[in-house]
Amino acid sequence: MGYRVVVAGATGNVGREMLNILAERQFPVDELAVLASRRSLGTEVSFGDKTLKTKDLDTFDFTGWDMALFAVGSEATKKYAPAAAKAGCVVIDNSSLYRYDPDIPLIVPEVNPDAIMGYAKKNIIANPNCSTAQMVVALKPLHDRATIKRVVVSTYQSVSGSGKEGADELWDQTKSIYNPVSEVPPKKFQKQIAFNVIPQIDVFMEDGSTKEEWKMMVETKKIVDPAIKVTATCVRVPVFVGHSESVNVEFEEFLDEDEARDILREAPGIMVIDKREDGGYVSPIECVGDYATFISRIRQDSTIENGLNFWCVSDNLRKGAALNAVQIAELLGNRVLKKG
C-alpha cells in the first residue's frame, strides 16, 4: 500500500526534479497529483514512464492526500500550505517561509531525523536552504566526534539556485559576449553573471550580511547545534548546476585529518574523493545528477589549535532541494505514516 502524493510547483526546476527523484527512488506512490499555477495549467510533466497534466493549485482539494511536496516559493506557500495542512495533508515545503518557525521542524534526514516527530504541531515540515543542506551533512559526523565551535564558509553557488531565470540569464549573456551585436543587461542578478562572480545572494541586512549568509547561520544552528558559530560569504558564480563550498571548521577537540576523512567516508550521504594530485577532487560539473554530497581537499588548518579545511560540492537541485524533500517524505512514511 502506497501514498497519495501531491507535487505543487511541478513545472519548475525543483518540482520536475522532485518527480524524477520520486520515480528513481521508487517511492511508494498509489496516486500522484501534479499542481501548478493557473498560467501553467495543463502543462505536461513526466513521472517515470508516465506523462501527467498539471492541475490548478488554486482550486485543488488536499483532503484525503497523505503528503504534499511544495516547490512554489514563499508567497504561494503562505497561501496554500496552511490549507493543505488543515486538510490533513502533511506539507514538505522547499521555500524559506517556515524554516525559522520554532514549531516547524527543519530536516536534513542524515543529520536530524528524530526532529521529524515535530511535524504534528502544524502538519508542516521545512526543507533547508540548498547551501546549508550540503554543508550540515558533512558537519554533523565531525561534530559528533569533536564538537564544532565555529564554521567559516565561503560558497560558490550556481545560477540554478535562483531558478530558471538565472540559468537563462547566464546562457543569454554568455552568448551575447561572443555576439556583441546583442547585449543582455542583468535582470535576475545585480551584475553581469557571465564570466563574473557576484558576492551577493538575496538582499542585504543591517549588519552587512546578505539574507543567504544569515540563512546558513540560523539553519545550521537549528539543524545541528545552536552553540555552533557560523559566518558565511555567499557568492554566485557562472555555473549552471552544482554548489561548491570552502569550509573551515574549528573544534573543541583535536581531530586529525586522516580520522576526519575516515569519519566522512562512513557518513550517510557523503562521498569522499580526496587525492592529493592534479584533479584529485570533485568540481561542480562532476556532481550533477548525483545524490551524494562530495567532500575533497580535507586538510589540517595550522593557524588554529583544532582546525580543519575541506571542499564540499553537491547538486543543488538534488540534495539542496528535491532530493532532500523526497528523503523527508521517505522518513515521514517510514516513521510516521507507515503505509509503504
Image (cartoon, rainbow, N blue to C red):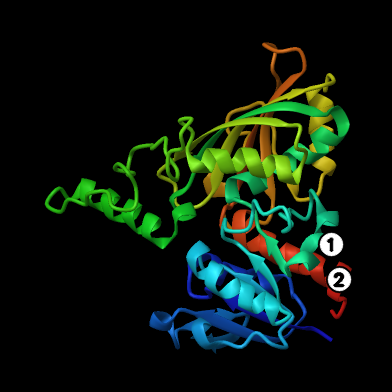
Residue at horizontal 64%, vertical 54%?
A: 99
Is residue 169 left or right of 161 when viewed as pictured?
left
Looking at the rendered structure, which numbered label has been put on residue 295?
Answer: none
Q: Which residue is mark 2?
A: 336
Q: Are marks 1 and 2 in contact (CB under 8 Å)?
A: yes
Q: Quadrant where the C terminus lies?
A: bottom right
Residue at horizontal 52%, vertical 73%?
A: 9
85 and 152: which one is in front? Answer: 85
Label 2: few (<14), some (14–19) or many (≥20) C-alpha neighbours in 10 Å: few
Quick one: SS at disc 2? helix
Is residue 127 left or right of 288 when viewed as pictured?
right
Find residue 312 and report its horizontal and vertical position in percent: 63, 38
10 and 299: which one is in front? Answer: 10
Q: Quadrant where the N terminus lies?
A: bottom right
Residue type, label 2: Val
Find residue 195 and report its horizontal and vertical position in percent: 33, 39
Residue at horizontal 67%, vertical 54%?
A: 101
Sequence order check: which comes first, mark 1 or mark 2?
1
Looking at the rendered structure, which numbered label has been put on residue 117?
Answer: 1
Find residue 283 and report its horizontal and vertical position in percent: 56, 41
262 and 249: which one is in front? Answer: 249
Quick one: SS at disc 1? helix
Label 1: few (<14), some (14–19) or many (≥20) C-alpha neighbours in 10 Å: some
Mark 1 to mark 2: distance in Å? Answer: 8 Å
Residue type, label 1: Met
Find residue 161 and report its horizontal and vertical position in percent: 49, 53
Is residue 149 left or right of 47 when viewed as pictured?
right
- Tell me, yes or no, if residue 246 can be seen here: yes
